[in-house]
Image (cartoon, rainbow, N blue to C red):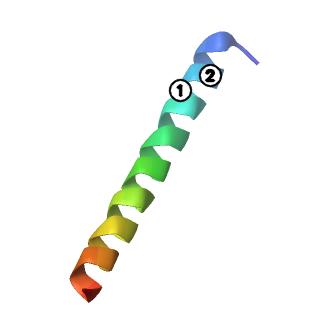
Amino acid sequence: MSLVVIIVLLLLFFRIIRFVMLQYKYDLMKNK
C-alpha cells in the first residue's frame, strides 16, 4: 500500500470518528 492511500484512509477514519462524537455529544445535550 502506498503512503497516500494510508493518509487518505486515516483522514476518512478521523472524520468519521469526529462526526460520531459530535452526534453523541449533541444527543447528550438534547437529553438534558
State which quadrant residue 19 falls in: bottom left
Please tell me which residue lies in front, 27 or 14.
27
The kind of secondary structure element at disc 1 is helix
Which three-letter amino acid code belongs to the residue tagged 1? Val
Direction bottom: furthest residue: 31
Locate residue 13, reporting x and y percent.
Answer: 54, 42
Q: Please report the residue visible at 57 percent of the width from the left and 21 percent of the height from the top.
A: 7
Q: Which residue is mark 1?
A: 8
Q: Position of residue 21 (x, y in %)?
A: 42, 58
Q: Residues within 10 Å of mark 2 (few under 14, many from 20)?
A: few
Residue 19: assigned label: none
- At label 2, the amino acid type is Val
Query: Splitting the image into 4 quarters, where does residue 6 fall?
Result: top right
Q: Residue furthest front?
A: 32
Q: Are marks 1 and 2 in contact (CB under 8 Å)?
A: yes
Q: Residues within 10 Å of mark 1 (few under 14, many from 20)?
A: few
Residue 28: percent from left, percent from top: 33, 77
- Residue corresponding to mark 2: 5
Q: Secondary structure at mark 2?
A: helix
Left or right of 18 in this view: 8: right
The residue located at (24%, 86%) in the rendering is 32
Q: Is residue 29 left or right of residue 17?
A: left
In the depicted structure, whether residue 25 falls above or below residue 3? below
Q: Note whether 19 is above or below 8 in the view shown.
A: below
Residue placed farthest to the top in the image? Answer: 3
Q: Residue at x 43, y 60 (%)?
A: 20
30, above or below 24, in the image: below
From the viewer's perspective, tell me whether residue 6 is left or right of residue 17: right
Q: Quadrant of the N terminus?
A: top right
* C-alpha span from label 1 to label 2: 5 Å
**How far from the left and from the top, in percent, is residue 24?**
39, 69
